[in-house]
Image: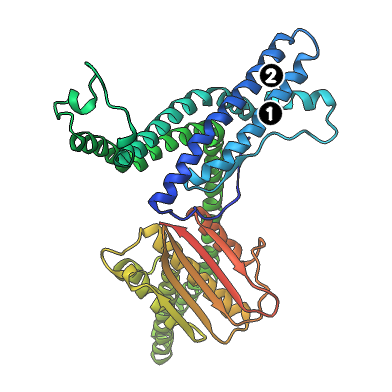
Amino acid sequence: MTALAATNDRQPLARSIPSQLFVDSGYVLLGLPLGVASFVVLIVGLSAGLGLMVTVIGLPILSGTLYAARGLADIERLRLPAVLRQPRIRPRYRLPEAGASAWRRIFLPMRDAQSWLDLAHGILRLIVGLATFVITVVWWGVALTGSLYWAYDWALPRPSGDDQDLAQLLGLGDSTTARIGLNTAVGVFFLITLPIVVRGCALLQASFARALLTGVAEMRDRITVLEEQKRAAVSAEASALRRLERDIHDGPQQRLVRLAMDLSRARMQLASDPEEAGRTIDEAVTQIRETLAELRALSRGIAPPILVDRGLPSALAALAGRGLIPIELEVDQQLGTRDGRLDPAVENTAYFVVAEALTNIAKHSRATEATVAVARQGTHLQVRVGDDGQGGAHLAKGHGLAGIADRVRAAGGELAVISPNGGPTEIRAELPL
């Protein structure tokens, strides 16, 4: 399966209008010579390969043509981020198996669908490139010559005889003022619309390239990500159920068993020793209270009512207040307002990350203080939990952080753990909004 390799984590920053105009113009103008070169090389290679297919030499020529198309496609992929403002991505092509024969290596690009898409782009890009090149050159030419017409009008020959210039044809007369005013107005119009038109041409050319060079691979990569998220969600749910079953078995279930035994003993003691029966009932009441407290604690770990009623800031404040060590809390209070509330799934995941991280800190880190920071970062919610403990935390299976990683991955986010030996430790989760 073809997947994608991204070389940048962040999108390029937005440029000013003049800067983007020159970037788009360079992209479109360079696209034509690249398109011509690509068309010539690939058409010649494809024709020779298909024409000589009846002989053995035709296959290596066709394979070489596909490799050439791949190289030309890589050049285009290098140019796309400047226009699309997206990270540079490249499909992962099929690789030869270890010990593959020469013929298998020759046939390898022919079995790769992306190689044929690269070939199609290399041939068809000339059509799109020619159209966008002409429009861009015309718009630049009219914008410059029209807006500067006043500077060279004196040097142009005047029409003679029955010939008329544009101003006369429009009924504005043959005066210098009318002539300069009309041409300058046309030039200014083209100059004002130049960034929009050139941007449209660049996006048309870049979108065509993206559709063929990365579109299919992006779709396959997205399917792969969704499958991984599904597996992570199933794993996180199974881990949560196992932990809940264990906590119920070790806590409330044992207390309820003892409660049943105490009540049975109290019933037998009522006739023979009422005072002892009263003491047994008092013990049973205590067991009931402790059981209710444990059930409330378990419910807080699943979805605390305060999170549903008052939002993430209040829920995290309550969580920090129950901490065994001092916890410094920095949470965007807008996340608790009606307009700033997050999607319930994001709130639950963020709360789970903080709750589990603080539990791990209390159990394993030997820390004396911890910090929790939650804030919006563009299109993501960033959750950071740090401590001054002994460090050494990692995401290996069987450790507490593995469950957090599955929960974050199921929500479409990413989890990073920075924990050198000796500390400090920081757990950073980014959840898409």
- What type is the residue that disc 2 sits on? Gly
In the picture provided, is 55 more to the left or to the right than 341?
right
Q: Which mark is residue 45?
A: 2
Q: Is residue 119 visible in the rendered structure shown here?
A: no
Q: What sort of colour scheme is used for the picture?
A: rainbow
Quarter of the figure with residue 44:
top right
The residue lying toward the viewer, choosing from 248 and 330, is: 330
- The residue indicated by pointer 1 is 68
Q: Crowdedness of circle 2 by 10 Å Cα count: few (<14), some, many (20+)?
A: many
Element marked by disc 2: helix
- What type is the residue that disc 1 sits on? Ala
**Spatial CA span between label 2 and label 1:** 9 Å
Q: Is residue 370 visible in the rendered structure shown here?
A: yes
Q: Is residue 61 above or below residue 425?
A: above
Residue in view at x 55 percent, y 41 percent: 79
The residue lying toward the viewer, choosing from 317 and 420, is: 420
Could you tell me which quadrant the N terminus lies in? top right
Report x, y in % for residue 144.
36, 39
Could you tell me which quadrant the C terminus lies in? bottom left
Q: Which mark is residue 15?
A: none
Q: Are marks 2 and 1 in contact (CB under 8 Å)?
A: yes
Element marked by disc 1: helix
Residue in view at x 52 percent, y 86 percent: 325
Residue in view at x 53 percent, y 29 percent: 32
Report x, y in % for residue 193.
31, 40
Quarter of the figure with residue 2:
top right
In the picture provided, is 55 more to the left or to the right than 277?
right
Toward the top, the furthest residue is: 54
Of callouts 2 and 1, the N-terminal one = 2
The residue lying toward the viewer, choosing from 73 and 433, is: 73
